[in-house]
Amino acid sequence: MTNQHDDAAPQSEGRYHTYVTHHIPWYVRALWICFWVGAIWYVVKFAIPMARNYF
């Protein structure tokens, strides 16, 4: 086995590194919003009162 180092220029090295962002669908955003609203509701409704009784 041989160790070969390619001393390529950064411009030619990066030509295959194209990063394309993908659009997040509206329903995925809606699911995350529902999750966080539900998590906050749970903490306010159940977790805080139980913590008062526990401590």
Image (tube, helix red, strand yellow):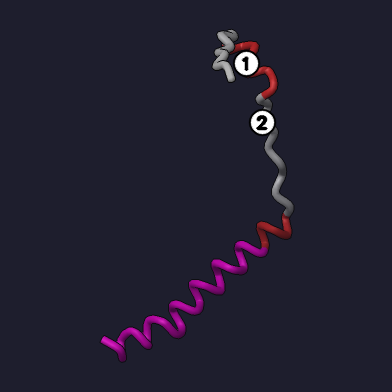
Report the residue at 37% width, 87% height from top. 49
- The magenta stretch spans residue 46: yes
Give the number of marks: 2
Q: Tag 1: Cα neighbours inside 10 Å, few (<14), some, or many (≥20)?
A: few
> Could you tell me how far apart the alpha carbons at marks 2 and 1 are, in whole angstroms?
14 Å
Residue at 60% x, 63% y: name it.
33
In the rendering, at what x and y percent does residue 18 appear?
Answer: 68, 26
Quarter in which the N terminus is drawn: top right
- Front position in the image: 35 or 20: 20
Q: Main secondary structure of the magenta part?
A: helix
Give the residue type that dot 1 points to: Glu
Residue at the image position 61 percent from the left and 62 percent from the top: 32
- Examine the image and state in which quarter residue 7 appears: top right
Q: Which residues are magenta?
A: 31-55
Q: Is residue 4 magenta?
A: no
Q: Which residue is mark 1?
A: 13
Q: Answer with left or right where residue 20 lies relative to residue 49.
A: right
First-in-chain label (2 vs 1): 1
Relative height, residue 23 to residue 14 (above, below)? below
Would you place residue 41 above or below residue 14 in this image?
below
- Of residue 44 and residue 47, the one placed in the foreground of this image is 47
Q: Which residue is mark 2?
A: 19
In the rendered view of the protein, which quadrant contains the C terminus?
A: bottom left
Q: Quadrant of residue 8?
A: top right
Which residue occupies the extreme bottom position in the image? 53
